[in-house]
Amino acid sequence: MSGQKINPTVDSTQPIQSHSRRGLLNGLWLALSGLALAEIAWLVGSFLKPLQSTDSSVQPADIIDAGPAERFVPNSVTAFPPGRFYLACLEDGGFLALSRRCTHLGCTVPWSPEKMQFVCPCHASVFDIRGEVVQSPAPRPLDRFAVYIENNRVKVNIGKPIRRSAFGEAEATYK
Ligand code: FES
């Protein structure tokens, strides 16, 4: 009995094992909590995401329904502030959707019905009804957006402005 020795290392490992077990449990708890949070976030996200619809009257966000084609008279320009474009109905009845952003430094260009021109208030660039430069410093015509007619309604895709160097007949859309 008196010859029995107590190994000092046995006692000192007990707290270490306990610590590492606690650390493992904490890590597991954190990982599970993270997983649960991610799942909740995914559920909330799926709930808030708009449902895909087969209803053709529902337009994608980038498509603006400008209205019935008859509403627009030749040689007129109608502003669509939410879409940030003008719908020009040309003399021959063709439609052209023009960005209201000046191609010089990006100011908003108002339409002047008296002058039948777009006149930029910033540095006096002038554009005609087709968006072509009449007076610089604008380096190129106003950008345009794709127009199409569906069920006799004029629709404009404002998703992607189209750069151009000059007006071409093919740019206008007809009924
Ligand atoms: Fe239009 Fe300069 S921003 S002319």
Image (cartoon, rainbow, N blue to C red):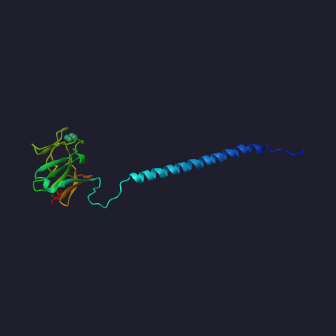
x and y percentages locating residue 145 in the rendered image:
23, 53
Which quadrant holds the C terminus?
Answer: bottom left
Give the residue furthest to the right: 2
Among the 4 quarters of the image, the one containing residue 13: top right
The residue sitting at 70% across, 44% down in the picture is 16
The residue sitting at 67% across, 44% down in the picture is 19
x and y percentages locating residue 127 in the rendered image:
15, 46
Ligand 1 - quadrant of the structure image: top left
Nearer-the-camera pick, 156 or 165: 156
In the drawing, does residue 19 fall left or right of residue 140? Answer: right
Give the residue furthest to the top: 122
Among the 4 quarters of the image, the one containing residue 70: bottom left
- Labels in figure, total: 0
In the drawing, does residue 51 fall left or right of residue 91? Answer: right
x and y percentages locating residue 30 in the rendered image:
56, 47
In the drawing, does residue 4 fall left or right of residue 135? Answer: right
